[in-house]
Amino acid sequence: MNTLLYKTLNTLFQCRNMIFSLVFCAIALVSCQPNRMTPEQMTVTGPKVNNFSVTEVDKYLPVDCLLPGQIRRLGGTVYQSSRRPIKTTAGDCEIRGGEYVMHDRANYATALNAWLPQAQGGDAEAQTYVGDIYQQGLGTPPRYDRAAEWYQKAAEQGNTRAQMSLGFLYEKGLGVKKDPAQAHSWYRRASGMQDFVPAEDASLTSLERQELATLRKEVLNQKSSTDALKRQLKESNEKLDRTRQQLEQRQKVMESEKKTLLEKRHDLEKRKSSAAGIPQSELLNLDKKLAKREAELEGKYAEIQRLRAEVDQSAQEAEKYHQSLSRLQEKLSNLPPPFIEINDPTILATRSVRLAWVEPEQTTRMVAGRVWAPSGIAQFTINNREETLQPDGTFTAKVALRSSGDTEVQIIARDSRGKTGSVTFSLKAQENPGSTGPVGRTFPDVEFGNYHALIIGNDDYARLPRLQTPIKDAQEIGKILKNKYGFQVKILLNASRLEIFRTLEETLRQLNDHDNFLLYYAGHGELDPVNRRGYWLPVDADPGSREKWIPNVEITDYLNIMTAKQILVIADTCYSGIMTRSAISPMEPGSSTEVRHNFLKRLAKQHARMVLSSGEEQPVLDIGGGEHSVFAKVLIDVLQNNNEVIEGVRLHQQINERVLYRSEIFGMPQVPQYAALIPAGHQSGDFILVPQ
């Protein structure tokens, strides 16, 4: 019986493979057919844009794939093991006979179905992916509390990515109580470095920024409501005063008339009692007059009652307005104080001192950041000198450096209600900036690995304005990486969505855990103001439809399934995602050669996923560097002039101030961002560039 079952299962398995082979042969035959274009398509002006179907691109996109179970034999029993989830591309999933859901990437339930069974069974990797699903939301609001629970389970089993993700939640206070010490503890465990010193992340998450922006709008609405309530309360009080005055006047008149009427009534009764010599008609006439006066008095009494009711109603309205106004004023008084976000320089929280490094020969240092103040800013100073804030709260200022010793920088923001927020740090000159000779002669035993780069430059768009610099930027950066840093470089110029993903998939297959990968993109980009998601726009992108746009999250998903040791994305446009600088542990400048050697030896083994973007949320300049963009020109100069091994965080430090200074000339301050990209699988460390 068991032998028959085994033969039957074996036959079914072979038949299934034959079916898949036939299907893919058919696909291959179809794909070899030449493209057929209508006359209308042949006469389109601008760059050639192939109208690839969505299904072609989808084969190169990352998916949650359920692989079929293995046919196993235990003694005389043949059985099939449960299906195994993996992260891979849709095409690879198909080839391996796996199951995945098409066109449903952002579905929460679908993603959970793939990973939850394994996670509940105790698999740390699956638990981490479940945490990712809850953290990212996938079509629903994020559940940070549930994400923290699953990350905790995986982190306790030693999963370094879960440890890093859990540290991020503690750092930002998402789903757990904000606890910087706990965050740094998890970052330290993930890095495996007991002397881990984080680069302080003075930036806000997109969620925090959105909340502050929403709070700011609410405050403006509340201030409008407060002004309206004050007007209504004033009008109500004025009406109440007028009504009370009318009531008092009417009451006085009524009391006077009532007294006169009583006197006349009394006089009439006396005359009636004496009645002698008084005609009956006269008495009747006096009765009618008194009755009429009494009726008029009743009417005035009713008017007084109406005025009393009106006074009571006006008093109630005034009290209601007063209570609403008090509640709003209390709400406004409980608003948080201003928060100061520092974008440049990068601050290190070392030895309980907040420190940023400067070059020894520098006499001034640019400081850039942003102030978030729901109540509005009344005063903003840097080292007791008033500075100007832009309408969006951003600022840049030059700080004069002391000729000797550290320069303390104190930034204070006071809001319209008198609350203050402040940031204090020191600028310290590097005592020993480091070697200027080639690193190969200094650290020959450090296994940095192999280096690969995919350089994308798009400027010739079919439906978007043409750009001036991306092609030259891409070519020059690719040349420097190849000739000076030993990269194997592939350059894509004016690439479509399909070409970009097809090349990424080819790169994915080539890389292993001894390789390092750099992805550079220059071209149009968009940032959705609602969900804070960034997009790269290939040359076939349509501004009216996002079908051909490339969400940053899809790039992040690709990085996550790559086996490369270290990855750096350089984007001369926006890049969004769950990022933090605190997961980076830069080495202090001025360290000895031996300390630096040991530091680089550890760093070269770590699994890092980093992003260097040319700006934040604002548009970035396509000009300003001659034939290159402002960002690309500075990056090219720094890479060309560098003669030592350089980590990504130090590369960022060297380009940051220069980009900011040059972009300010054009009235568009641009602050490059550098951070660890946690959802891409960042575990610890940094990207290293090694000149040859």
Image (spheres, rainbow, N blue to C red):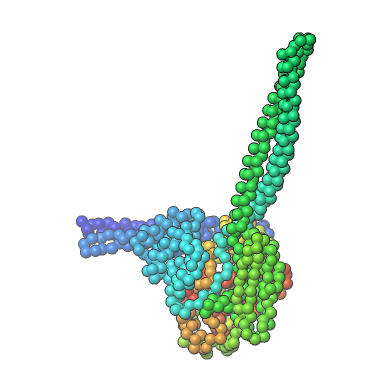
> Is residue 50 shown left or right of residue 629?
left
Mark yes or no: residue 282 visible. yes
Residue at 59 percent across and 70 percent down: it is: 673
Which x, y percent locates residue 341? 60, 68
Q: Position of residue 284 (x, y in %)?
A: 75, 12
Name the residue: 56% across, 86% down. Answer: 590
Question: From the image, which quarter does the C terminus lie in?
Answer: bottom right
Question: Could you say which is closer to the camera, residue 667 or residue 398?
Answer: 398
For residue 40, say whether it is visible.
no
- Left or right side of 675 for 298: right
Residue at the image position 53 percent from the left and 69 percent from the top: 580
In front: 404, or 323?
323
Where does residue 94 sit, x and y in percent of width and height?
42, 60
- Would you identify the image quadrant in which residue 667 lies? bottom right
Vertical relation: 637 (above or below) 523? below
Q: In the visual, does 275 lie left or right of 82? A: right
Total numbered labels: 0
Q: Residue at x 43, y 71 (%)?
A: 160
What is the x, y in percent for residue 215? Answer: 60, 57
Considering depth in this image, is 667 or 482 the residue closer to the camera?
A: 667
Q: Is residue 161 above or below residue 197?
A: above
Where is the N terminus found, in terms of image quarters? bottom left
